[in-house]
Amino acid sequence: MSKPPTWRVALVFALLAAVPFVPGVSRYHLLLAFDALLFGAIAMSLDLLMGYTGLVSFGHAAFYGLGAYTLAVLMRHWDVSAYAGIFMAGLVTLITGYLFGRALTRLAGFYLALATFALALALPQMLKCSYVSPWTGGAQGVYLDRPSAPLRLPVTSDQWWYFVTLGILVILLWMTHNLVAGRIGRAIRAMRDHPIASQAAGIDVARYTALTFGVGAAYAGVAGALAALLLDFVAPDSFTYWLSILFLVGSVFGGMASVWGAVVGGLFLQFWPDIAGMVSRDLVDPVFGALLVLSMRFMPHGVAGMVSAWRSGGWIRRMLHGQ
């Protein structure tokens, strides 16, 4: 995996960091940018799981919700700080994802997709269960008090948490790049491309599958915790299976097996409905669907794949022939 030039990386994040201070950017626009960063983290998680390992997950909304509720319960009932709660949300979803992946190591393809889909269907109902409703608030959900900026910094609470989210996204990008470029990355790509040969070479397929599932779930859990702070509220019906499908769409559009494609997918999911809505609110869903069909035809490897083809030459031919 090629690493983008450092100056380009620095420029991108400098532009993102300047968003809260751009004249005319309202609180609404800042929250949209905040949400786009969260979608980017989720898309990165799915890219790691599906693009590099070849596993299919329709249940990422469950890990997203688990991270949000972990933070909410810790803050509401245990007086844990928001910063420690974010870390604990990542840890809880890491362990849960690892155990889930370990239990399903013998499943693959369609069967694994069904198992993860069942997880996405089950979580909202489990959160409403009377046994846990004293902690989760049942169908009514849980309200949170988002901390303000520390040390009397001259920024609003929204701006501060935007910077926190951007910093966490940078850390996740760095972690993902090092993971896929190292020994673990080579192992999981071997599992995806040559599963039988990788087993014969001594790769512990069950262990690496569970580890990848756990890391992907941890990313989703951290994003869920940040989303809970963004909204100051969590409820079971916010984490339905449809959310998992949207996450998957963003990841595929940005480009599988691409760290930067994940960020593009997150931006697409967040801002495309608003851009299409400027033309007509009635055309948002039809245009969204048409754009996805066209992107699968002319950009089978997503935006990241198109950019890579353009840089290597002959990108029009590759797009037309779906290569």
Image: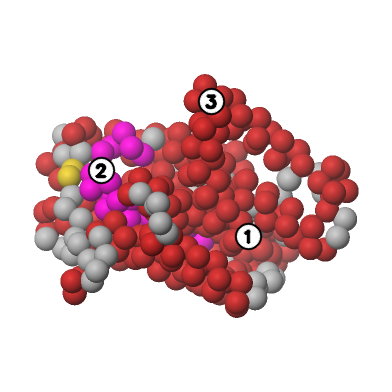
Q: Which mark is residue 3?
A: none
**SS for dot 2:** strand
Whole-angstrom CA distance, mark 2 to mark 3, is 31 Å
Quick check: marks 3 and 1 in contact, CB under 8 Å? no
Residue pictured at 81% horizontal, 46% vertical: 319
Q: Which residues are magenta?
A: 212-239
Q: Earlier in the sequence, mark 1 or mark 2?
A: 2
Q: Is residue 226 above or below residue 292?
A: below
Q: Report which quarter residue 180 is drawn in.
A: bottom right
Whole-angstrom CA distance, mark 3 to mark 1, is 32 Å
Q: Is residue 98 above or below residue 285?
A: below
**SS for dot 1:** loop
Q: Of residues 159 and 168, which is closer to you in this image?
A: 159
Relative horizontal placement of residue 258, taking residue 322 as reference (left or right)? left
Q: Of residues 110 and 137, which is closer to you in this image?
A: 137
What residue did someone put label 1 on?
A: 258
What residue did someone put label 3 on?
A: 280
Percent across and percent down for residue 97 are 41, 55
Relative horizontal placement of residue 13, taking residue 289 as reference (left or right)? left
Q: Report which quarter residue 83 is drawn in.
A: bottom left
* Tag nearer the camera, 3 or 1: 3
Percent across and percent down for residue 20 are 38, 59
- Amino acid marked by disc 2: Val
Quick check: marks 2 and 3 in contact, CB under 8 Å? no
Q: From the image, which quarter does the N terminus lie in?
A: bottom right
What residue did someone put label 2 on?
A: 234
Near mark 2 (Cα within 10 A), the count class, few <14, some 14-19 or many ≥20, is many
